[in-house]
Image: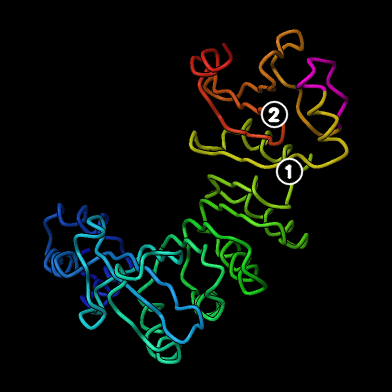
Amino acid sequence: MNSVPVAFLDTLCATLQKTDLKELQKIDNRWSRTVETHCSRRRELIVYLYSNDDETEVWMRINEVPNYWNTHVPYSTLTKHDRIRRISMRWIRRELLPETIPMKRFRTKVLPVLSSMTDAFILEAYAESSKKLWESLFSVLHAPALKIKTNYLGGKCVEFIERQIALGRLEELDLCGQEWPKSMKASLLAFWKSPNFECLDISETNLTVDLEILIIMVERFLKGELCMETSLCGKPSDGKMKELREAVRSGGTLPLLEGIPQPSKSPSLWSSCDIKWTGPSERILRASFSTTNLYIRPTYPAYTSFASQ
């Protein structure tokens, strides 16, 4: 590493999160000063955005993570060392958003700056009234998102999610709304197969969990590809998944479903409305059926036994 050019190290440090920079600081080397400079100047930020009713103004607040409301950061003080890790577009009391920016200026001047500082971020988009705001945001954000929580906010929203899934860094996706297009199925399948997939919640949408999705989850679990934080929640689709749900909840005989591995739980014990598969290290994948939703997650045997009581 002593022969690495300083310019390269400077560029590399600019892409790292602050936690990674702190780890590099522990290594005593000739390039430690570059790391120290980036770490000392780095601020990791959360941006709150909302607009007035006629969408002529954007109200904004920038805070430093993790102190949130105790550390307001004026937009005018942002530097190239700052990184935006969370963007929140939801209703917040007007008095908590100190900066007022004309919509046109925000879209042409401010938003490109914010976009250039955004990386490995979380997006929360629940403000349905701010169409100009979120359409602009979805159009310019090209950095990889780690978590997305959003209502259905139109075609730009769908394109943004599909683009983020294609980037391959997305870990969690939480959707709401009843207007999601069926064409999203292909992108969601790619998300389920992604090595970074951890969580998907579509229980409050018109999207459903079908047999193909269940098979993907079970097969990945049996191969040891799912971490313990993995979870999937959604309404089972009609057809074969509905048959499976009714059989599990009634304690009856499971239907023969092509492609799905044999569960490890005995039919006579299906009193807790779930199916279980035993995987590597004796971990268990639990698929639980409520009256409306299917919830899938890995567990440890001790927790599963306790939860079933």
Judge whether 195 appears above or below 264 on screen.
below
Look at the numbered disc 2 and give the secondary structure of its residue: strand
Residue sitting at x 12%, y 60%: 29
Q: Residues in magenta? A: 247-257
Residue under label 2: 289
Labels 1 and 2 touching (C-beta < 8 A): no
Q: Quadrant of residue 7?
A: bottom left
Q: Quadrant of the C terminus?
A: top right
In the picture, the disc for residue 209 is: 1
Q: Main secondary structure of the magenta part?
A: loop
- The three-letter code of the residue at mark 1 reads Val
Above or below — where is 248 with respect to 183?
A: above
- The quadrant in which residue 214 appears is top right
Q: Nearer the viewer, residue 252 or 128?
A: 128
Please provide percent x and percent y for residue 107: 45, 87
Total label count?
Answer: 2
Q: As shown in the figure, which amino acid type bears the numbered disc 2?
A: Phe
Q: Position of residue 47 (x, y in %)?
A: 35, 68
Label 1 vs label 2: CA separation? 12 Å
Front residue of 308/36: it is 308
Instruction: State the image quarter where residue 39 is shown.
Output: bottom left
Up-down relation of residue 3 to residue 216 (above or below): below
Query: How far across and how far down the image is residue 173, in percent?
Result: 56, 53
At label 2, counting other C-alpha atoms closer than 10 Å, the crowd grade (few under 14, some 14-19, many 20 or more) is many
Q: Look at 40% across and 91% down and name the residue there.
A: 105
Asked whether residue 268 is drawn in magenta, I would say no
Q: Is residue 171 above or below residue 53?
A: above
Residue 302 or 262: which is nearer the viewer? 302
Q: Residues within 10 Å of mark 1 (few under 14, many from 20)?
A: many
* Image side of residue 28 versus residue 216, left or right: left
Q: Residue at x 59, y 70 (%)?
A: 160
Say which residue appears at 20% left-offset and 75% top-offset: 6
